[in-house]
Amino acid sequence: EQLERLEVEFQKQQYMVGSERLYLANALHLSEAQVKIWFQNRRIKWRRQVLDNHPQ
């Protein structure tokens, strides 16, 4: 359930500002740092997928 919610939020926006991140962290019973790191890692994965689909 947490992962699904994180993915939904990532599809809406790939970057979260402090207040949004804090709200999401509280809603999912995670720390703000955990949400921040998850978004950082997810952006890396997203960039890799984009590069794999569009080789230069």
Image (cartoon, grey):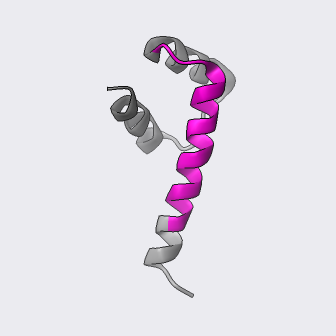
Which residue corresponds to the image point at 58% horizontal and 22% vertical from the top-left?
20
Picture layout, residue 50 above or below residue 55: above
Q: Residue at image x 39%, y 33%? A: 3
Secondary structure predominantly adopted by residues drawn in magenta: helix
Residue 32: image quadrant is top right
Which is more toward the observer, 44 or 17?
Answer: 44
Is residue 8 among the parts visible in the rendering? yes
The image shows residue 53, relative to residue 6, as above or below, that is below
- Residue 23 location, x and y as percent? 54, 15
Please count the marks in the image.
Answer: 0
Q: What is the quadrant of residue 44 in the picture?
A: bottom right
Q: What residue is shown at x 37% (from left), y 29% (from top)? A: 5
Q: Position of residue 36 (x, y in %)?
A: 63, 32
Q: Where the C terminus falls, by quadrant? A: bottom right
Q: Which residues are magenta?
A: 29-48
One can see residue 15 in this view? no
Q: Quadrant of the N terminus?
A: top left
Measured as percent of width and height from the top left, residue 35 is found at 57, 29
- Name the residue at the bottom extreme: 56
Query: Is residue 43 depicted above or below 12 in this figure?
Result: below
Whether residue 32 is in magenta: the answer is yes
Please, is residue 49 above or below residue 42 in the view? below
Give residue 47's quadrant in the image: bottom right
Find out whether residue 46 is within the magenta segment. Answer: yes
Q: Nearer the viewer, residue 2 or 20?
A: 2
